[in-house]
């Protein structure tokens, strides 16, 4: 599995991906999930992938080769939206080629992509491309996308990230999101690939690969755990019947009462009559014969 997160902000874009793939606990590999595309200082794109590795690699190869879809590829697309359409068409082409064989093998056609960047004259844009080849675009109201093991790193993003978040603060938030995922899921692992794209740069000016020896990420891993525990300990414990320091946890709700407690009924109930077992047929016949002899 994997975890990738992409953020589209006022000042640019942030991309972060892990590099672990696995097919069971004893087959773990390291493969990059991030691919970068740049041409003549007039366009820059980043692609991150999750799902079936063979499918995502096939899609990336089609894009690198510059295959045309109705005369358009990543190298001549006039907008980021057109470039996202090209990514979707590449996904559809791989599906048409492979889905029958995958279905026969009992394998789902599974892939997801975060694709973003900038074409000169446009603002930076970010898209989430699905396995059907369709996609959605990030907005100021929803400025980030996640693919892969997303649930562990989502809370910090929801609490911190807005469209106006500065790039450096967003970078820190993305790394904390990744650290939370690494802590809770062994299918996500180091090294990490991090790209911070500044608006109108049209190149990868801030690009780094992070492993367990990286001093900044090591500091985040240590401090985030310590600060979480400190924040947890600073919250007062619940007060029952106003007996503690904190607010009462027993305050009545506005719409519902407490869960009802069902008790055993006090009314006596006469026990059911035991069911008499029927005698076997042979024994019935013997009993009938004995009765006949007695009468005789």
Image (spheres, helix red, strand yellow):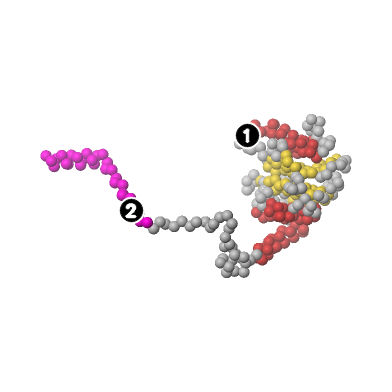
* 277 inside magenta stretch: yes
Image coordinates of residue 221 in percent, x first then y, are 71, 58
Spot occupied by residue 139 in the image (x, y as percentages of width and height): 76, 45
Percent x, y of residue 102:
64, 35
Residue at the image position 76 percent from the left and 55 percent from the top:
172
In 3D space, how far apart are the residues under numbered discs 1 and 2 (Cα atoms)? 61 Å
Q: Are marks 1 and 2 in contact (CB under 8 Å)?
A: no
**Viewer-nearest residue: 230 or 183:** 230
Q: Is residue 228 left or right of residue 249?
A: right
Residue that sits furthest to the left in the current view: 296
Q: Which mark is residue 196?
A: none
- Picture quadrant where residue 226 is located: bottom right
Residue at x-position 22% and y-position 39%: 285
Q: Residue at x 63, y 46 (%)?
A: 24
On the image, which quarter does residue 218 sit in? bottom right
Q: Report the front residue among 44 and 33.
A: 44
Residue 230 in view (yes/no): yes
Left or right relative to 251: residue 204: right
Q: Residue at x 61, y 36 (%)?
A: 106
* SS category of the residue bearing label 1: helix
Could you tell me residue 51's position as x and y percent? 68, 42
In this figure, which residue is indicated by the disc labeled 1? 103
Given residues 2 and 170, the one toward you in this image is: 170
Residue bearing the label numbered 2: 270
Q: Earlier in the sequence, mark 1 or mark 2?
A: 1
Write down the region rendered in magenta: 267-296
Residue 61 visible from this viewpoint: no
Q: Is 293 covered by the magenta stretch?
A: yes
How busy is the neighbourhood of tag 1: few (under 14 within 10 Å), some, or many (20 plus)?
Answer: few
Name the image quarter holding residue 296: top left
Q: Is residue 25 left or right of residue 202?
A: left
């Amino acid at each position: 599995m994997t975890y990738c997160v992409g953020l589209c902000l006022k000042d640019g874009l942030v991309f972060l991906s892990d590099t672990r793939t696995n097919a069971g606990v004893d087959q773990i590999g390291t493969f990059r999930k991030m691919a970068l595309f740049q041409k003549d200082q007039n366009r820059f794109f980043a692609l991150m992938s999750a799902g079936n590795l063979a499918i995502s690699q096939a899609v990336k190869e089609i894009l690198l080769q510059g295959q045309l879809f109705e005369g358009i590829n990543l190298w001549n697309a006039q907008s980021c939206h057109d470039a996202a359409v090209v990514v979707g068409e590449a996904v559809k082409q791989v599906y048409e080629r492979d889905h029958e064989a995958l279905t026969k093998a009992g394998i789902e056609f599974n892939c997801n992509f975060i694709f973003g960047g900038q074409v000169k004259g446009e603002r930076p844009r970010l898209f989430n491309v699905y396995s059907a080849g369709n996609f959605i675009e990030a907005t100021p109201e929803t400025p980030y996308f996640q693919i892969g093991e997303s649930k562990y790193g989502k809370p910090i993003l929801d609490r911190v990230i807005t469209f106006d978040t500065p790039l450096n603060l967003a970078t820190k938030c993305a790394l904390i999101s990744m650290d939370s995922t690494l802590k809770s899921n062994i299918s996500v692992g180091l090294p990490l690939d991090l790209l911070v794209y500044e608006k109108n740069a049209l190149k990868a000016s801030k690009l780094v690969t992070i492993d367990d020896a990286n001093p900044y990420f090591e500091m985040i891993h240590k401090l985030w755990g310590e600060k979480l525990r400190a924040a947890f300990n600073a919250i007062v414990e619940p007060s029952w019947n106003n007996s503690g320091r904190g607010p009462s946890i027993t305050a009545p709700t506005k719409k519902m009462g407490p869960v009802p407690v069902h008790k055993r009924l006090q009314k006596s109930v006469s026990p059911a009559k035991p069911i008499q077992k029927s005698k076997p047929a042979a024994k019935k016949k013997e009993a009938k014969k004995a009765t006949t002899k007695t009468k005789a």
